[in-house]
Amino acid sequence: MEKVKQINIGGLSVGLIDVDKILEEVKSFGINVDEILKKELLHIVKQKNYVPESREEEYKRALLREYKKFIGEEVPEEEEGLRIKVLGHGCPNCEQLTQEVIAALTELGVAADFEHVREPARIGEYGVMGTPALIINNKVKSVGRVPLRNQIKQWIEAEVKGE
């Protein structure tokens, strides 16, 4: 069965089919030169996934990063782009927070990698003790309430400016 994994490519979360199988396969080749690894990873990924030609270099960098994590090397996450997560099981407040974030992004004209995380195990990874929770670029901004849209916009603008 094919499994889709989300990886950060150029600041956006992209779903790729069978990444872990591909990483295991490439590991068996014993290649230890980054440029060769990047080419081989991209070549195999393209057999099951669409990769825009204009973004191949971004894919190569992201795949190499994933490979290094896979073999146990410490690799810093790529910090490009704006990443927003709403944590919550789907209660009315969680849904309202999702809608407020989307509205704030729309009003600001800002693009973001946005995800509503509903799985309890994944919510627990963030160490929050309540929902809904708002995470912007891995920073907890709000827990247990739905902040006003203007506050959400201020947080987003501050992250875009790098504050």
Image (cartoon, rainbow, N blue to C red):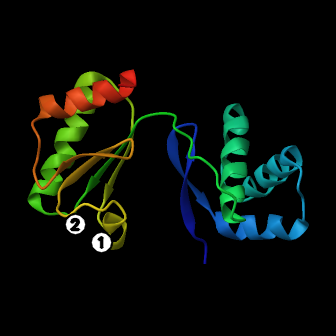
The image shows residue 25 at horizontal and vertical percentages of 80, 69
Residue closest to the eye, 73 or 85: 73
**Disc 2 crowd, CA 10 A, few/some/many (<14, 14-19, 20+):** some
Check if mark 2's residue and mark 1's residue have beta carbons within 8 Å: yes
Query: Residue 96, relative to residue 4: is it above or below?
Result: above
Q: Type of residue at label 2?
A: His
Q: Mark number for residue 120?
A: 1
Question: Does 56 sit left or right of 139 as displayed?
Answer: right
The image shows residue 84 at horizontal and vertical percentages of 34, 43
Q: Gap in Å between the C-alphas at discs 2 and 1?
A: 7 Å
Based on the displayed image, in which of its 4 quarters is residue 147 positioned? top left
Query: Residue 93, relative to residue 20: is it above or below?
Result: above
Residue closest to the eye, 23 or 135: 135
Q: Which residue is mark 2?
A: 89
Q: Mark number for residue 103?
A: none
Q: Residue at x 56, y 41 (%)?
A: 78
**Disc 1 crowd, CA 10 A, few/some/many (<14, 14-19, 20+):** few
The image shows residue 38 at horizontal and vertical percentages of 80, 47
Q: Residue at x 61, y 72 (%)?
A: 2
